[in-house]
Image (cartoon, rainbow, N blue to C red):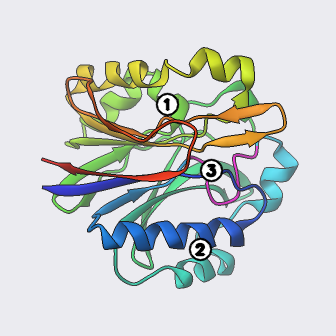
Amino acid sequence: MTRIAAAQTPEFREDVDAALTYALTVIAEATAQGADLLVFPEGYLQGYLTQEPLARRHALNLTGPAFTDILARLPTAGPTLVLGLIEEEGGRVFNTAAVIRHDELLGRYRKTHLLAGEAFFGPGTEAPLFEVGGVRLGINICYDTNFPQAAQKVADTGATLLVCPANNMMKRPAAEHWRDRHNPARAERCRETGLWLISSDVTGQRGDRIAWGPTAVLNPQGEVVAQLPLDQPGLLVFEMP
C-alpha cells in the first residue's frame, strides 16, 4: 500500500513566503500520517496568476537562487511533493507542477492544455513519469483533465496514478456551474485509462470569486473513494493499493 495525500488549501497570491510557511505545516502533518506523496494545488506557490505582467514578475526559474532557497527550506524527510507554481525558463513562463523529493527537484510537468486566459503561458509537451513508494504516476493540471488524450498520454507511460493539481477559484456563477462537474469529468478519464486519480484544489473566497474544491481520490472505475468536505482547508490521506 502507498499512502497518498492531497492538501485543500487557502489561496495565496504574490506571497511565496506565506504559501511556503503554510505548506510546511501541511507537510509536517502529512509526514506524521506516513504519507509517501503530497499534492498541492495548481499555481499554489505564487498564486494562479493569469495577468501576464504579474505572472512574469513572480515566476521562478527552477535552476535559480530563489528556487534553490525554497528547496533549502523544505524538510529532508517526509513525502514527495507535487507543488504547483509559475515557472520561467528562457524568457517564457509556464504553469508547472514541480516534483520534489525532500529538498531535491526530481522533475516537472508543464500544463499542456491552456484556457484562453492562460494563452501567454508556454504549453507543455511532455508527460514525465515519476515513481513514489512503488507507485508510478504522471500529472495533468486542472483543465488538462477535460482532454482524454492528456490522461491517455500518462497511462501510456505505464503510470497507475494520475495527479491533478487544480485551482477552481472562479466567479460565483461559474463556480456554481462547475461545483459538481469536476469529479464526473475526472471519473471519465479514470474509466478510459484505468488510472487512479488524486486531485488537490484551493478553497475560500476572494472578492466576487469563490472556490470549494474538490480534493478527492477516484479509483479506476471512476468512483470517488475519498474526498475532503467542500469549502474548508484540510488534508486528505488515502492508502492506495
Q: Amino acid at mark 2?
A: Thr
Name which quarter of the figure residue 37 lies in: bottom left
- The magenta region covers 42-49
Q: State the residue at coordinates (69%, 46%).
A: 48
Task: Describe residue 120's horizontal placement relative to residue 7 as left or right.
Answer: right
Q: Amino acid at mark 3?
A: Gly
Instruction: Say the numbered circle drawn on residue 232.
Output: none
Q: Nearer the viewer, mark 3 or mark 1?
A: 3
Label tally: 3
Q: State the residue at coordinates (59%, 73%).
A: 63
**For the residue labelled by badge 3, is the local secondary structure a helix, a strand or a loop?**
loop
Q: Position of residue 197 (x, y in %)?
A: 32, 37
Q: Nearer the viewer, mark 2 or mark 1?
A: 1
Which image quarter holds the N terminus? bottom left
Residue highlighted by disc 3: 43
Mark 1 Cα within 10 Å, few/some/many (few <14, many 20+)?
many
**For the residue labelled by badge 2, is the local secondary structure a helix, a strand or a loop?**
loop
Name which quarter of the figure residue 195 lies in: top left
Mark 2 Cα within 10 Å, few/some/many (few <14, many 20+)?
few
Q: Is residue 91 magenta?
A: no
Q: Can you see residue 105? A: no
Comparing 219 with 193, the one in front is 219
Q: Earlier in the sequence, mark 3 or mark 1?
A: 3
Q: Amino acid at mark 1?
A: Asp
Residue highlighted by disc 2: 63
Residue highlighted by disc 1: 144
Q: Position of residue 53 (x, y in %)?
A: 87, 50
- Distance in Å between CA atoms under marks 3 and 1: 14 Å
Q: Position of residue 45 (x, y in %)?
A: 64, 60
Q: Can you see residue 13? A: yes
Q: Is residue 233 above or below residue 19?
A: above
Q: Earlier in the sequence, mark 2 or mark 3?
A: 3
